[in-house]
Image (cartoon, rainbow, N blue to C red):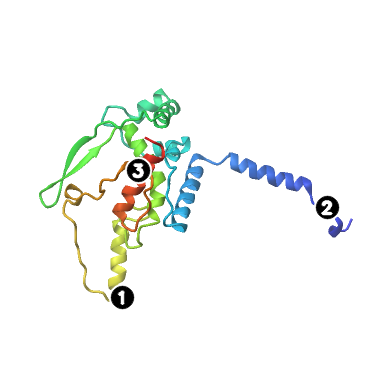
Amino acid sequence: MPAEERGPDLRQARNVARSRGLAQRLATPLDRVRRLQTSLQAKAKAEPTFRFYTLWDKVCREDVLSEAYGACRRNGGVDGETFAAIETAGRKRWLGRLREELEAGEYRPRPLLRVWIPKSNGGQRPLGIPCVRDRVVETAVLMVLGPIFEADLLPQQFGFRPGRDAKTAVRRAFWHITDHGRSEVVDADLSDYFDHASCCPPQEPSSVSNASRSSSPARSFCSRSRVLGASGNR
C-alpha cells in the first residue's frame, strides 16, 4: 500500500504515549519541585500584581519537604537531634509526622540557639541556629517563596540569590571598570539595619489576606509572607 494511503500507526502512537506516561511516573521529587518553582516564578513575572493566596499547601507537599530535608542534611540541630538519628529511626516516618503537624496547624517552631560571630570592626553579629525540624521547614518555605521574590529583584542584586554570590558581584564591578572605564567605586553598608528598622509595618488581619505584591522589596516580603500564613490559616 502506498505510504500516502496508510492509516496512522496505532502501535507507534501507543508506544509514544506509554513512554511519555512512564517518564511522568519516573519524575523525581526534585523534578516536581523544580516544575513548581518554575510555575510560581512564571506567574510572578507575568502578573506583577498577582496575589498568591494558596502557598501553604505547597510547603506541606511531600516532595517539597523531602527536597528541603535533603538540602539541609549537612548540619545537625541544636536540640541534639541529628540527621543520622533520623535516618536510623526512619526518614519517611519523620517527614510524615512533620507534614501532619504542618497540615493540621500544630507545628510550632522551637527556640533558636543564639551565638555571636565576631565582626571585623570589633562588634558582634547575632546568629540564630535552629533545630533540624525547623531548618527543614524554613528551607521548604524558601523553596516556595524564593521563585516569587526572584521576579521582583533587580539584575544588580547579587546577595543570597540562586547562581549569584559576592564573587559574581566583584566580577561585574571589574567589568564596569575595565570595559566601561568607570573609576569610582562606592562601598556602603547600612549599619545594623534590621536591629533598628521596622521593615514590616503592622497590618490589620483583614488586610493580611488581601496583601499584594509591591514595588518595595521590604513591603513585598512582608506582604507575601503574610499571604503564606493567611492562606493556610496557620
| Mark-to-mark CA distance, 1 and 3 | 50 Å
Q: Earlier in the sequence, mark 2 or mark 1?
A: 2
The residue positioned 42% from the left and 28% from the top of the image is 100
Q: Up-down: is 151 above or below 204?
A: below
Q: Quadrant of the N terminus?
A: bottom right
**Residue underneath mark 1:** 180
The nearer-to-camera label among 1 and 3 is 3
The image's mark for residue 206 is 3
- Left/right placement of residue 127 relative to residue 87 reads left
**Tag 2: residue type?**
Gly
Q: Residues within 10 Å of mark 1 (few under 14, many from 20)?
A: few
Which structural element holds mark 3?
helix
Q: Earlier in the sequence, mark 2 or mark 3?
A: 2
**Tag 3: residue type?**
Ser
Q: Up-down: is 84 above or below 182?
A: above
| Mark-to-mark CA distance, 2 and 3 | 62 Å
Question: Which residue is more in the foreground, 163 or 107?
Answer: 107
Residue 201 location, x and y as percent? 25, 48
**Residue underneath mark 2:** 7
Residue 73 in view in this figure: no
Residue 47 location, x and y as percent? 45, 57
